[in-house]
Amino acid sequence: MDLIANHISHRFGDLAVLEDISFTVGAGEVVAIVGPSGCGKSTLLSILGGLLQPTSGAPELRGAPPADSLNPLTFVFQDFALLPWATVEENVEFPLLHTQLSAAQRRALVEDALRRTGLTDFRKTYPKQLSGGMRQRVGISRALAVKPAILLMDEPLSALDSQTRELLMEDFVRLLADGGMGAVYVTHNLEEAARLADRIVVLSRRPGRIREVVPVPMTRTERGETAAREKLLALQNQIWSLIRNEAIDAEREVQHA
Amino acid sequence: MLDRAGTPAKDETTRRVRFRGAGFVPASSRFGGWIALALVIAIWQAAGSSGLVNPLFLPAPSAIVRALYELALSGALWQHLSASLLRIGVGWLLGTAAGVVVGFAIGLSRLARSVGITFISALFPIPKIALLPLLILWLGIGEEPKIATIALGVFFSTAISVYSGVDAVPRNLIRMAQSFNVPFATIVRKVVWPGALPAILAGFRITASVALLLVVSAEMIGAQYGIGAFVLQAGNLMQTDQLLAGVVILSVFGLVVGKVINLLEIRLLHWR
């Protein structure tokens, strides 16, 4: 299943946020979206996932989702969006409650998702008892439970400390390794984008337009090797040179707002 | 080498950095409140026993306890208490049920919000006890107008706390549920209701006080039995020990309701 951004533009009142965004995320492909602060990255993701109506254009799907997918487009949120009154396993089970699955089938899916994210021993804990990294693991586990075709990840690591970010990045690489699941990964962190994405969509300052689409010329497995570090760094520098001046302008604009 | 200063020479005196971080912590000692209460009662009793205070104006605590005991023995206590409890119970339940329904409607529907908030803003500030004569005219002089007055007072506060609670449910949780195609009814049941529950229970605490205030006022205006009627009657007869016994009963009722709501919060909001 492909996800297509078809000439998407969006305004909040008089404020133009996105302008004529078009790109396609192929099956199993990981596309990162980067750009200066306030360029509309998260807005674009909300539109792609059907949580926000664009002013013009539309997000579209091409092809059928995998037969076992219960929610083809599934978000992983920056703030985790966990139900604080529910335990880890109840949070993971939450998106399955309204499906036609039996209790036993739901339990099996929850078990599998908890196992894949290393949360099996934390099933009865509440979100407030967990660290930020573990909470995001619950968010990922919940997303995996519905067997998504494409993960929509909105700066999933930005609320975490650097060590936790590194550990979760390794998890993402592992989860996306087999190419069975695609992702749109919104981030302001160029290192994350370069390590995870097959292509990087660089947006301009608000109103966000596609400035360039940069392919990452390595497999994700290759990127973990020491020899690849220099190439990845060069790629990050290339993207940073594209957005640096606009990032400075955007920062000043935010401060003056 | 970080220790560039080295150890001080023998003739150099050192002084400890003064601790400046004390206080401004919202904490209380475990028995402080009880000790203070016992102290006040002891002083009050001593003042009464020594004749410093005229018992007609302020009877000693022992006289109030005696009055309570006699009321309990005579059966009058239960007669008045059961009448008040029935009015509070029925009025509070009716007002709460209606308030929860209307509060949720306002919180979840744009149309209900526009209509509901206009009416609530206009009617909430009216002291509900002022409506009692009108309610007597409409409903007769029985229990109904007293119960209706309590229900009205409880309804508005409940509706406001419920829709404020619904408004306060983090939108990110609702968007999360929508992103998984969770149906509206399940979102209300599994996200909005538990998310609004802290505000709803806080509202119950307020409405319990409102109900108590209104039952006493209504009973003072027109009732033969009830704690309000009893307190008024005792005041008219200058039986201040009985009057204060009635006040103690009201205070105990308020404490018990507060305790019940505390227990409910512990049980239902253990996740906080």
Image (cartoon, coloured by chain):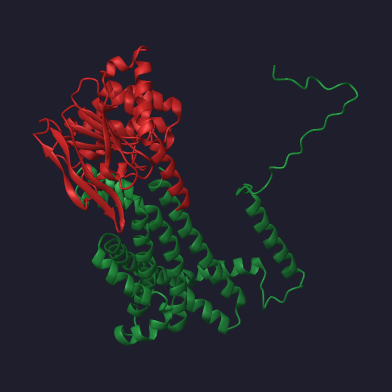
Chain colours: A red, B green
Above/below status of B157 relative to A67:
below
Above/below status of B245 relative to A138:
below
Report whether B255 appears left or right of A231.
Answer: right
Q: Residue B39 or A198: which is nearer the viewer?
A: A198
Considering the image in quadrants, where does the C terminus of chain B appear? top left
For residue B99, say whether it is visible.
yes
Q: Residue at x 37, y 60 (%)?
A: B164
Considering the image in quadrants, where does the N terminus of chain B appear? top right
Q: Residue A111 or B33: which is nearer the viewer?
A: A111
Q: Residue at the bottom extreme?
A: B137
Q: How many marks?
A: 0
Dividing the picture into quadrants, the one containing residue B167 is: bottom left
Q: Residue B261 or A104: which is nearer the viewer?
A: A104
Dividing the picture into quadrants, the one containing residue A225 is: top left
- Residue A29: x and y, percent? 20, 27
Q: Residue at x 67, y 47 (%)?
A: B23
Q: Residue at x 36, y 67 (%)?
A: B92
- Residue B86: x and y, percent? 37, 69
Above/below status of A223 relative to B61:
above
Report whether B206 appears left or right of B36.
Answer: left
- Residue B41: x and y, percent? 67, 62
Dividing the picture into quadrants, the one containing residue A70 is: top left
Q: Residue B32 or A112: which is nearer the viewer?
A: A112
For residue A120, say whether it is visible.
no
- Residue A226: x and y, percent? 37, 12
